[in-house]
Image (cartoon, rainbow, N blue to C red):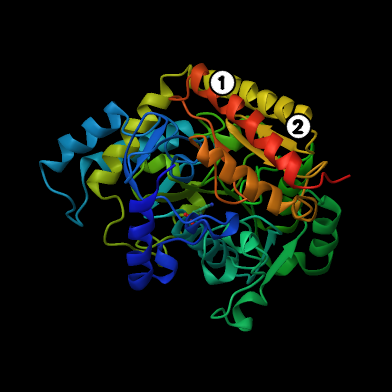
Amino acid sequence: MNRSISKRLYEEARTLMPGGVNSPVRSGRAVGVEPLFIQKAGGCRITDEDGNVYIDYVGSWGPLILGHSNPEVVAAVAAVLERGTSYGIPTRIEIEMARKVVEMVPSIEMVRMVNSGTEAAMSAVRLARGYTGRKKIIKFDGCYHGHADSLLVKSGSGLVTFGIPGTPGVPDEIVKHTLSLPYNDLESVRRAMKEVGDEVAAIIVEPVAANMGVVAPAPGYLEGLRQTCTEYGALLIFDEVITGFRLGPGGAQEYFGITPDLTCLGKIIGGGLPVGAYGGKKEIMEHVAPVGNVYQAGTLSGNPLAMAAGLAMLNALGRGGIYEQIEKNNAYLCEGLRMAAVSAGVSVTLNRIGSLGCGFFTPGPVTDLESAAKSDTKAYALFFREMLDRGVYFAPSQFEAFFVGAAHQREDLDLTIQAAHEALRVVGQKCSPQS
Ligand code: HOZ
């Protein structure tokens, strides 16, 4: 495949941006490739600057559940665009969006729009601290809640991809209040809470971890977190930036039937534009300024373009039918990938929930960061490159999810499975299988 234009653009980009990119994982470093530069996208396909077309399972890292350039979303943005791009003054569409979120997400009675998932998690933690008057927070190894200082401890996504456990620039004084515990290990939470529970403002968790690959919660895990938070007066924060509107209209909290105190949203809620949100019980949310004293603000928060895109997306998802289809398609894809791995003699553990999936190059099971880290990342990198050469774009990291969306048709899945048979055969020949 000729990627000479992407190559030239990458050279230019590297002189102007750190690593030539605006976010690390997409650089392709972890899988030994140079990044594609994308010219356009439609449905489940992306086209690079050289004119190569790929079936896309990244979908802008989750937001594009309806596929690229969805006509409803595009039309909604275009209609608003004619009237201006941002006012910094309230608009009617913000009320519509807030009402939609309150209707769809079971635990949310009030919501505040922000501009990214990072902002949502950072603000939710601040609110939890302001509300409880406590400093400590508990998070889980391999969960990623964006890049706010207090949450960059043993994080997933780019940090696990590049082996960065903490990061320079974050003072010890800040992270000393963050306790990171193994995911899916309720006992360690109970032990920690016994010791310092009355100092803990919140437990923040990805209800399905999707930044160390994909790891579902063990039965009883989320219930246990809920119970422990209630017992010690700490808030339970669900980071549903990935799972929100993805596992179902009401996200993971509806899927598992657990009520968090606060929820962080992002990705799908913006329809592909930069949006995040946090929300929860009215009684807690009314501690946010200007009603309460917990300060948080944003010039572009609730801006009309982003609200139009997100609202169009949520309206389409609310009409139903989509979740069954994408879950079924993901099951079909994962089974095809599993069979391809078996026939190539490569150990792959396929974790799947709803339309999220991840193939770990390890016999598994993968239930937490420790077991995810056993993956043969060199084998994944080779798999990624072989798939790319066959026109399929998976995440350029072992520790990210793949996303099946409504635009993936059976024929796209079949092409992917066929490519995986060939790619995994190469992996089987070049990488020694793990036992
Ligand atoms: N944080 C996103 C993945 N979970 C974005 C990664 C990137 O674009 O580098």
Q: At which x and y percent is residue 169?
A: 53, 80
Determine the residue positioned at 83% across, 68% down.
Answer: 195
The amino acid sitting under disc 2 is Ala
- Tell whether 308 sits left or right of 134: left
Q: Quadrant of the C terminus?
A: top right
Residue 199 visible, this angle: yes
Q: Which callout, 2 or 1, points to the residue nearer the camera?
A: 2
Q: At which x and y percent is residue 357?
A: 63, 36
Disc assigned to residue 344 = 2
Compared to 334, does 240 lie above or below? below
The amino acid sitting under disc 1 is Asp
Determine the residue positioned at 27% across, 38% down.
Answer: 308
| Mark 1 lies on residue | 414
Residue 217 visible, this angle: no
Compare residues 223 and 299 and report the one nearer the observer: 299
**Quarter-of-image position of residue 313:** top left
